[in-house]
Amino acid sequence: MRDYYDILGVSKDSNETEIKRAYRKIAMKYHPDRNPDNKKAENKFKEAAEAYSILSDSSKRQQYDQFGHSAFNGMGGGQAGFRSMNMEDIFSQFGDIFGGNNPFESFFSGGRVASRAKTGGDVKVKIKVTYAEIVNGGSKKIKLKKLKLAEGATFTNCSMCGGSGQVTKVTNSFLGQMRSTSICPQCKGYGKVINHRPSGSDKNGMVKVEETIKINIPVGVETGNYMTLESQGHEDINKTSGDLYVFFEEEVHEHFSRYGDDLLLQVRIGFSQAVFGDKIEVPTINGKASLKIPAGIEPGQILRIRGKGFPRLRKSGRGNQLVKIQIDIPKKLSTDEKKIIKEYHDITASKDIIFEKFDD
Ligand SMILES: [Zn+2]
């Protein structure tokens, strides 16, 4: 079994933030949602989840440091909870890094950038896409507000850590000397502090800038899918940028809904159409399609229009459009209609009523 610190790629004396950051990076990279049918990625993901579950818990970490893997024998790696976690969950688990759920709140996370030593902060945005855009693709422009190092900002070596970004504390206890290393509180791990702060910049010499970027909408995308645009996030004082995460969210459609790759529509037809059958026109995402209604159709029956659903993400082919038929029972009748239906009623009313099992 691999060492938990090696799995996360962190040192034995790394702090909570570093462990969290390392895990998040691995989890994002190897998440099954992003690596469908990739056993290797899945294993890496599980391995990291297990390592994180131990190292993020201070008492478990202590046990692990002392006894290694044998501290958890018989535990059976029961980290099933992590496996079913989707990307949004990972983001919400690390909400303290990413800010609130509303992406438009987390743009200005100036104060947080500093706590994430040596990388600019990530930016997370949500963009709404219509069904037509999901089917046809296309692009969308979004405005981002992010942090950039101000022109003319200069820095000097941090006096507290001497530029290493880390400070080591030695405490004496009855067990002997204890050394603990943590991120330097003065420079937040950057190893340098601001010397000249250009006007308009914050205490770290950063300014907020607005940027417009074009996002290409992948066909077949669905709510919860996201793309990563590397180095498009906040810049830090070393001019290293975090990443930009773009989450897609489907816009609610007036009458269509979605089930996987299928497009769903309900149609209400007249009862004589149900009896005799008919050929009707129904809307599709990109126009219209003709639909044959078989004679004697029952309410609730579903008809399928092949290939008129959503394109499959990163695969070929398309889903179907499923049309659920409902039958309209007339409430108001003209004299003529009344006469005809009355005649129909008189010849059929003597038919037996059939009792059946409740069915939805
Ligand atoms: Zn320092």
Image (tube, helix red, strand yellow):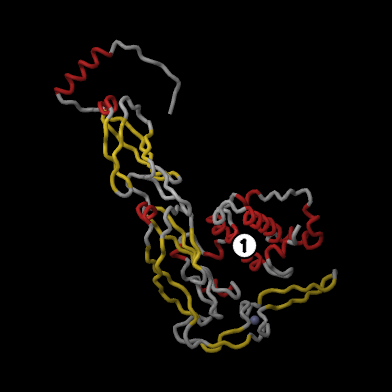
Mark 1 surroundings within 10 Å by alpha-carbon count, few (fewer than 14), some (14 through 19), many (20 or more)? some
Task: Residue lying at the far front in this picture: please name it.
Answer: 316
Residue at the disc numbered 1: 26
- How many marks are shown on the rendered structure? 1
Inspect the image, locate mark 1, and give the three-letter code of the amino acid beneath it.
Ile
User: From the Cβ of disc 1, is ligand 1 less than 8 Å away?
Assistant: no
Report the residue at 38% width, 34% height from top.
302
Q: Is residue 19 left or right of residue 148?
A: right
Above or below 197: residue 327: above
Q: Quadrant of the C terminus?
A: top left
Q: Position of residue 311 (x, y in %)?
A: 42, 50
Q: Position of residue 335 (x, y in %)?
A: 14, 23
Image-quarter location of ligand 1 = bottom right
Frontmost residue, 188 versus 49? 49
The answer to which image quadrant residue 200 occupies is bottom left
Q: Quadrant of the N terminus?
A: bottom right
Report the residue at 48% width, 78% height from top.
148
Q: Position of residue 41 (x, y in %)?
A: 62, 56
* Label 1: which secondary element: helix
Frontmost residue, 278 versus 344? 278
Q: Is residue 52 left or right of residue 313?
A: right
Frontmost residue, 347 versus 172? 347
Report the residue at 65% width, 57% height from top.
44
Q: Position of residue 170 (x, y in %)?
A: 77, 76
Above or below 51: residue 191: below
Task: Residue lying at the far left in this picture: please name it.
Answer: 335
